Image: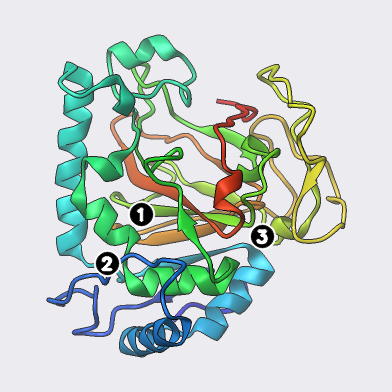
Amino acid sequence: MGSSVLTPFAEPGVFRAGAPGAAGAPGSTGGPGPAPTPAADRAADRAGVRAANLATNLDLDEIEAFYQQHGFVILRDLLGEKLIARMEQECEAAQAGVLTGDLSARYGSTQYLDDAAKAERFVNYVEHIQELASAVGEAAEDPVLTGVIRRLIGARIWLSGSEQTGVVYQDARPGRESGYTRIGWHSDWQAMPSLDVWPGLAITIHIDATSPANGFLRVVPGSHRWATPAPYRNVNGVTVPADARPTGGYTDTAPPFEMPLGFEKVPGEIAVYAERGDVLLHDGYLWHSAARATDDDTRRRHVRGSFFAGEQAAYRRQFIKNAAR
């Protein structure tokens, strides 16, 4: 299991779930359970999650403590190579379908790119991938995973699905044909500061391991506890709506320094690396950015979605593109 403190020579926040024969672990024949619903019996749900966590050697108390302090965790060996391999195949097929035009415009995205024209030559994003890749839906419904998420942000979680922004497949590459290579400092809350859907977290399922060669996540541990301002200052000249909440975070404590507008070094930041199959959970209030790859022949693929524990009825489309690209 991962350490509950940041220590030298340790992988901070990594919690290994892979007990042989455990549901979702390598070698397991058991599939994921049904998707959680608000009407599910809470006692039975808690009992099922406890049993699943025992089978996977996960310590929920330790995971929760680390997440509350630092704002992220990585679950390793949870989903298993068989599911990840199928996810990779299904996502690549969908990516090809978007590029050829065989799939509808619903699945092609340019809103996240640095230059929308590049989408004509390469597909960095496939939106609503959960509708095209059954492995993605299975992973998002994994009972151990959803049990951990409930522990971290609240009991009544819901996935941003087909009626919302959905789950996205991302293929980040450093070449000139690529419309996405990196992203500057931001918190996910800053993209939707008017909505009462928070708290929330991002779930990232890594198809490729990450490194300085193909790019990696940068985070500021503990920044989710700060009252981060809405992005009134941003490099893209985007206007923040008048109904935006002025700050977002778990406390009223102001950040000790301003969030950079680009890719600058931040005091206390760390690199978070992932292995193939890792499931990264990071809080919606956490400061983070993604570093550009240093090897032009690499790629960094993952599936990314969001779970929320606030009011689902409060959701409406809002995307403030404040982060530098």
Q: Answer above or below: position of 3 versus 286.
A: below
Asked whether disc 1 touches disc 2, contact meaning CB atoms under 8 Å apart, the reply is: yes
Gap between marks 1 and 2, in whole Å? 9 Å
Dot placed on the residue nearer the N-terminal end, 1 or 2: 2
Residue nearest the viewer, comparing 79 with 48: 48
Gap between marks 3 and 2, in whole Å? 26 Å
Q: Residue 12 location, x and y as percent? A: 54, 68
Q: Secondary structure at mark 3?
A: loop
Which quadrant of the structure image shows residue 289? top right
Looking at the picture, which amino acid does disc 1 mark? Answer: Ile
Residue nearest the viewer, comparing 154 with 253: 154
**Going 43% across and 27% down the picture, which residue do you hit?**
180
Q: Which residue is mark 2?
A: 79
Q: Secondary structure at mark 1?
A: strand
**Going 74% across and 35% down the picture, which residue do you hit?**
260
Q: Residue 35 location, x and y as percent? A: 33, 64
- Please identify the residue farthest to the front as the structure is shown: 39
Q: Which residue is mark 3?
A: 221
Gap between marks 3 and 1, in whole Å? 20 Å
The disc at residue 205 is: 1
Q: Answer above or below: position of 107 versus 199.
A: above
Crowd class of label 2 (few under 14; some 14 to 19; many from 20; radius 10 Å): many
Crowd class of label 3 (few under 14; some 14 to 19; many from 20; radius 10 Å): many
Q: Secondary structure at mark 2?
A: loop
Q: Please indicate whether residue 43 sits to the left or right of residue 173 in the image.
A: right
Dot placed on the residue nearer the N-terminal end, 3 or 1: 1
**Going 19% across and 84% down the picture, which residue do you hit?**
21
